[in-house]
Amino acid sequence: MINWKVILNIAKTHLLTKMKSTVTASLGVTFGIGAYITLVSFMTGLNEMLDSLILNQTPHIHIYNEIEPSEKQPIALYQEFEDAFNVVNSIKPKQSQKKIHNGLPILNYLKKDKKVYGATPQLRAQIFYLSGSIELGGNLVGVDIMEEARLSNIDDYIVEGTAQDLKNSENGILLGAGLAKKMSLKEGDRVQVSTIKGDVFPLKIVGIYQSGIADIDNIQSYANLKTVQRILGEAQNYVTDINVKLYDINEATAMASSLGKKFQVKATSINEANAQFETGSNIRNLITYAVSITLLIVAGFGIYNILNMLIYEKMKDIAILKATGFSGTDVQLIFMSQAMIIGAVGGILGLFVGFVLSKLIDNVAFETEALPTITTYPINYNIWYYIIGISFALISTFVAGWLPSNKAKRIDPVRIIRGT
Amino acid sequence: MDFVLETKNINKYFEKPVKFHVLKDISFSIKKGEFASIMGKSGSGKSTLLYILSTMDTDYTGELFLNNELITGQKHSKLSQIRNKNIGFVFQFHYLLSEFSVLENVMLPAKKLAEKSLAEIEHDAMEKLRMLDIEKLAHQRASRISGGEKQRVAIARALINNPSILMGDEPTGNLDSHNSENVFSIFKRLKEEEGLSLLIVTHDEDFAKRTDRIIQMEDGRILD
């Protein structure tokens, strides 16, 4: 039979009369948990931002036509050399077009698929931007801009003008920010582009596009699909890429390989294209947890120390409690509840401190050319980090309290009272 | 005969530093309402015996009966309950919980027993304090009162659950003659008015002579 009221009352009295130690021990936990919350919110916030910077510009499945040599060279088909060892020098890529064969039927097929959130056609063209006598090499990507805005966060990267502006204009272009700077152009100006064949077209700048990645912003611009088809002098079924977004990103790899086989095209999934980002995030998370756990273990040792000292100080009290009829378990519970109170109070305070610090960081200005949509440091307010934080506080104080309290449980009152 | 405490052939050895036979075939009994004292030289084993009788020391052979019930071999948690309910203990040093008030110290064993409501316990505790003439100290911190007062508080605490027997390990050993006299008369009164059984280990011959019965111990044996 455990009388919690009496036990908690004794624990409370011990804690209140040893206010200094109690506060020190609680602050240890508060500091550990607060630092964990701040660190993990900030680090995962940064991780997410960096990942989304790349991943949001990468479709879940990218379908295109790879220029590559035939796997079977013609000589392999020639029966007379069937058993011979054939050596072919200077293999050239197979003669084929850059466009996806049957691009529009594939697109229609994808749009009907229930797993597909959306699919957009693209036409990537090599062009030159003309500025006086200077020619700057680059890409012009023809897109279905409204569909693109629905599926990716391209809207975030259009720093001047809007997606709608591009859709409404026949000869509009969303110029890369780096290009605009190089050529001293702004929204409303005209820019001339030249195809590889040498045809020159004037386009009107309806907006500026800034992805945050300089290598892209210095060469890439967007225009309507039809505009680019017209510039290249190609038909309306001429698309070089299809970008697919799925409802469930985890199906990307399986679906990419089945699409590739079905339509005889190259289909890569986001996982293959960006394997290294996953690795980077994992390592950053690992560091965050290593640091946090170290902090919490240090706090745990603080609690262990203070409880140990408290138990040495309270030897006589423990002996008295046992002599007057408290069992070893009662005594252990008295000290365990002290540890748990320290853990709970320190932990909850730590969550609060962590939240306030995260809020502070969240409001610190963080403006950089590379990230047009970010104005303050990113913070990830995930409720799970708070749940993990308080659980860890309770678990570590439980462990830290267990060892000393177990010692208190086994103290022999006779030895203390007789002073031997 | 109605015995409150009875032992049969209790033997105890100390293992450290060398094997030593402390208690040799101790068999005796305390009647209900008897005021007995144990006397003997230092090292005669009288305190050791008392701690075995108090159920705190379980490392012995033989049998111990409390209210004709076998105590030997019970689990520690059960022994705690028995101590809590049936045995009051007074030490040479007063051993109060210094952070608690006098009243809380007295109430604590009753709260642990949890047979009465808090209000009843408080009422009982005040009654015990009044009986020992220290009710004025009830709300003082236990660390702020004098040695004689502390010993009286300890007696009040030992009595709070109305135990079958009160045991004392030199309860007057650390007190001046005035306070010793005071404690003795309290014990005497408890025996006469409440019919309480008492077993007191003491060095004080004057104290022992005035008890009902002196149990003399020498070299781990009881002398008849």
Image: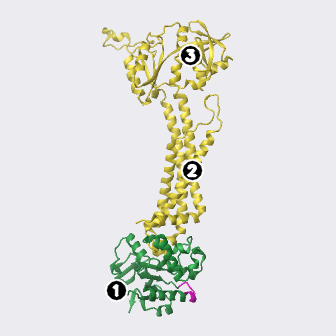
Chain colours: A yellow, B green
Tally the marks.
Answer: 3
Circle 2 crowding by C-alpha within 10 Å: few under 14, some 14–19, many from 20: many
Residue named by callout 1: B2
Amino acid carrying mark 3 in the image? Lys
Residue range (magenta): B173-179
Q: Nearer the viewer, residue A69 or B93?
A: B93
Tell me, for residue A3, which label it has, or none. none
Residue named by callout 2: A350
Circle 3 crowding by C-alpha within 10 Å: few under 14, some 14–19, many from 20: some
Amino acid carrying mark 1 in the image? Asp
Residue A379 % position (x, y):
57, 38
Amino acid carrying mark 2 in the image? Gly
Residue B69 % position (x, y):
33, 79
User: Rounded to the nearest whole Å, what is the CA distance between mark 3 and mark 1?
Assistant: 108 Å
Query: Are the residues tagged 3 and 1 within 8 Å (C-beta)?
Result: no
User: Rounded to the nearest whole Å, what is the CA distance between mark 2 and mark 3?
Assistant: 51 Å
Q: Is residue B147 visible?
A: yes
Residue named by callout 3: A167
Q: For this view, does A368 lie left or right of residue B56?
A: right
Q: The numbered mark 1 sits on a residue in which chain?
A: B
Residue B118 vs A207, above or below: the answer is below
Q: For this view, does A354 lie left or right of residue B36?
A: right
Circle 1 crowding by C-alpha within 10 Å: few under 14, some 14–19, many from 20: few
Q: For this view, does A255 lie left or right of residue A9?
A: left
Of discs 2 and 3, which sits in the foreground? 3
